[in-house]
Amino acid sequence: MEESQTLVSNLIDNPDLWQDVVQNQVGRVSSRAAWDDNDLKTGKQSVWNADNLIPRISPDGAIENMLPFLTKIPSWVPLAFQPWKAQEISRYNTERNFWLGQLEKVRHNERENETPTSWMGKFLFAKDGKAHGISSEEEAGYSVGMLAMIGSVLLSSPLQNLLLAFCFYPEWQKKAQDEIEMRCGDQVPSFSDIEKLPIVRALLREVFRWRPPVPLGVPHVLEQDDIFEGFFIPKGTILLAAEWALTREETIYPDPETFRPERWLDPSFPTYREPLTQYPEIKGHSGFGYGGRTCVGQSFSEIVLFTMTVTLLSRCNVVRKKDPTSGKDVDIPWMDIPPPHAIVRPAWFSLDIKSRHEVPYKE
């Protein structure tokens, strides 16, 4: 809740920097959970790690992915002749040094705590620290670091797209604000109010569908030969559950290109479920994966996104920016995602954010 208040305050002060503000603030939330570290520099480093890793794992982001034969070049060839490899080694070393450095910080800061306050601390000092198959401190450093890094980018994407949705569909911002005022009164809304606020949950569920953070899904390898709808797929084939296509199936999502949160609230839509104290919910969304490979961060994502969204809605209005000369709304691109990597966020656009109340926790 503290970080959510800071997010709103910084957005009001710097609306043109909304993209960096959202990314860095979500990065700091993930850093506090991972290492109990609220230093903004730590959050920014997690964002930097994500921004530099994502192109490396994207089909069009690294030259080795487009020209796989480059990975076969012998190791004795000097790096001066392999600039792409030198770049990846530099990125890897920066990431590794940061993660293991954070581990040592936690070791120093939480040594005397009876109840560790971070994910990393629980591994280092709790009795069940070596649960979940993690066998070494180095593996724990990587596991926690990756959770913090991916949390930073995957949670900032839907929040950024929600700002975009509010500019195109201001009526839904107003409906959610009215719901918060009716159900929560004058109190500051929090995650404990989640059952009372189905419209807010519908906004989040719909933004995941409307602009999925991982549009191609996560690649998996087929473990055995299979036949799907008459097509033979051999063992070893890389498969992607194309989230963009799944969320645009018109028999399930009528008018799929339109942001329509009512599809989760109105019984006339095929996606409607009861009770509305539970549904719609973020957890269980296909973007988190399936079965035993389902994302472990669903509950964390729900807490962070709901808390930040209700704080944003209760404290400010997101509006289109006016052209000072003409007085007309500045144009916003409907679909601009540069570059289209494995994890995507909207391109920067001009907007304005107005305070509805005095915002505490200003930094």
Image (spheres, rainbow, N blue to C red):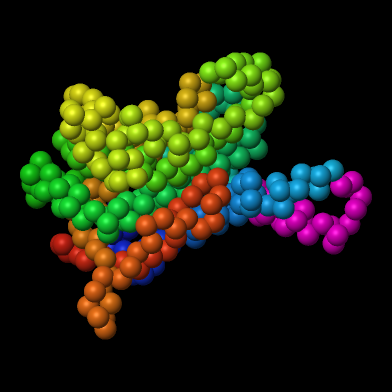
Magenta highlight range: 73-96
Q: Residue at the spot x=54%, y=56% of the render?
A: 339
The total number of labels drawn is: 0
Q: Position of residue 318 (x, y in %)?
A: 25, 60
Q: Nearer the viewer, residue 303 or 313?
A: 313
Q: Nearer the viewer, residue 144 or 313?
A: 313
- The magenta stretch spans residue 87: yes
The answer to whether residue 22 is left or right of residue 92 is: left
Q: Residue at the spot x=37%, y=54% of the render?
A: 160
Q: Position of residue 337 (x, y in %)?
A: 47, 55
Q: Nearer the viewer, residue 110 or 150?
A: 150
Q: Position of residue 76 (x, y in %)?
A: 92, 50
Find the residue positioned furthest to the bottom.
325
Q: Nearer the viewer, residue 346 or 13?
A: 346
Q: Residue at the spot x=41%, y=55% of the render?
A: 335
The answer to whether residue 178 is left or right of residue 308 is: left
